[in-house]
Amino acid sequence: MSERKAPEKIDNDEITRQRQIARRIRENNEFEEMKTGKHKRMHVITFGCQQNNSDSEKIMGMLAEMGYANTANKEEADVIIINTCCVRENAELKLYGNIGALKKLKEENPSLIIGVCGCMMQQEHAVEIIKKKYRHVDIIFGTHNIYKLPELLERAMNEKYTLIDIMNTEGMIIEDIPVLREEKFKAWVTIMYGCNNFCSYCIVPYVRGRERSRKPEDIIKEIEGLAKDGCKEVTLLGQNVNSYGKDLDIEVDFADIIRMTNEIEGIERIRFMTSHPKDISDKLIHTMRDCKKVCEQLHLPFQAGSNKILKRMNRKYTKEEYLKKVLTAKEEIPGVALSTDVIVGFPGETDEDFEDTLDVLRRVEFDNVFMFIYSKRIGTPAAEMEDTASYEEKHRNFEKLVKLQNDISKKLNDKYMGKTVEVLVEGRSKNNPSKYAGRTRTGKVVNFTGIDGIIGKLVNVRINEIHSWFLNGEMHNEVGQ
Ligand code: SAH
Ligand code: SF4
Ligand code: F3S
């Protein structure tokens, strides 16, 4: 085994060095391809949230730079990278199953390189498990040093040991890492990294570090580049986008970034996530209302309805404050689709507390609710709290939530019947490949009958069938034609 400490500070020379290694690997790969006639291939598996998806796009960008083509088939890959999540226990369990399954592939092809990275690798106990039980893993790296992939890969080609390179101090923000995006017409753009909120149940601040905002000019340059390449929709990403800019030494906030993005020619839709209820400002709500390109969609996690539980969660708002903010957003932004995250069964949550969660759902009427049963995360304050409710009790309440929300979602979707909505066409429908699928500005999935050549375009679709989780319809015309 070889463990190395990463440098505390990354300068431009370090980035140039990584690019040089990448070029060297590419040349080697091209040379081998000439000999064998086989193109080198990569397979990247991503767990977790959009932040991880965005990191995986960078990992794939770097691998493409090194001469690897993407493959959906693990069996034919020369490099397999698994980007992990540890926000809940089931995400961890899934990972071990996946790594275990790769052992056979490594035995069949010893030159296959297997890398494991991402949030879970920022936790010592997880790295220990992989080191001990999954010796076929070649590289382990964390969330702060993905830029080092070329160096790690080159070393892994020459060394037999598992290379472990985790930075515990947060890295600087590294710009100019190549990005390989699956689609041209929509893109995630990370505007800030990390989180300062330390909600008592959440592991994210420990594995992603403190808030770091990208410079506005870097963000805008990236979005302008995307627009030139035909991108129509951007989703601005951060664990708490409303904190954007607080760590910069210039006067700029998240609403300013939205206004600047709204001016970029070619961009037609702006989305963002996530906002923390304590930080959502009137300025942001007014900006959403006033900027034409900002979609009528707001994801605002409330987690729990009971003030006692919110306090124990360290969320820093009350049920009443949450309701006031969300209802203001509803008034100011006509037709806004609201979504939220809810945790069921936080330590100490009684059935009476849970009633408050149901009450918020009934009062707000969210279009979409992401529901999670509380999962104990080692190292967080909530892991030390007494948790007496059984899994069955928690599950029963979870089912109540699902039932209530299904009815609400269906009722809200019913309003779309017969309406014509703008859809950004994302591809063929998964359920029915003879149809197309895309999303409305409010984020609803629409399956519809269309015509050739519309993928990536904005079209008007008339809705003729309603379901709880999607809508069906028929294309009317292309927007602007
Ligand atoms: N920064 C975002 C997303 C954080 S993770 C935010 O604050 O909204 C996404 C969701 O996972 C959280 O909103 C929360 O509902 C859920 N979550 C986080 N930690 C959890 C845990 N220990 N158990 C269950 N759900 C959790
Ligand atoms: Fe986790 Fe809270 Fe930060 Fe969201 S705001 S990432 S839930 S600590
Ligand atoms: Fe998971 Fe890391 Fe995102 S823990 S939810 S992938 S920030």
Image (spheres, grey):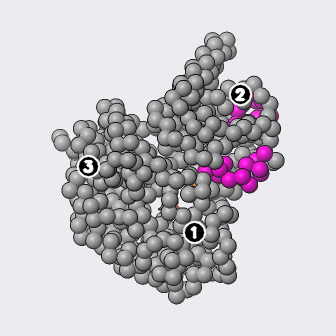
**Image location of residue 203, percent across then percent down:** 60, 60
Kind of residue at badge 2:
Arg
Query: Quadrant of the rendered structure where residue 455 is?
Result: top left
Secondary structure of the residue carrying tag 2 is helix
Secondary structure of the residue carrying tag 1 is loop
Pick the residue in front: 104 or 324: 324
Name which of mark 2 and mark 3 comes first in the sequence: 2
- Report the residue at 18% width, 42% height from top: 480
- Report the residue at 60% width, 16% height from top: 27
Tell me the CA gap for discs 1 and 2: 39 Å
The residue indicated by pointer 2 is: 155
Quarter placement of the C terminus: top left
Residue lying farthest to the bottom in this orientation: 352
Note whether ligand 1 is within 8 Å of mark 3: no
Tell me the CA gap for discs 1 and 3: 33 Å
Q: Which mark is residue 200?
A: 1
Name which of mark 1 and mark 2 comes first in the sequence: 2
The residue indicated by pointer 3 is: 259
Q: Which residue range is magenta in the image?
A: 105-131
**Image location of residue 37, percent across then percent down:** 64, 15
Secondary structure of the residue carrying tag 3 is helix
**Image location of residue 83, percent across then percent down:** 61, 45
Residue 237 shows in the view = no
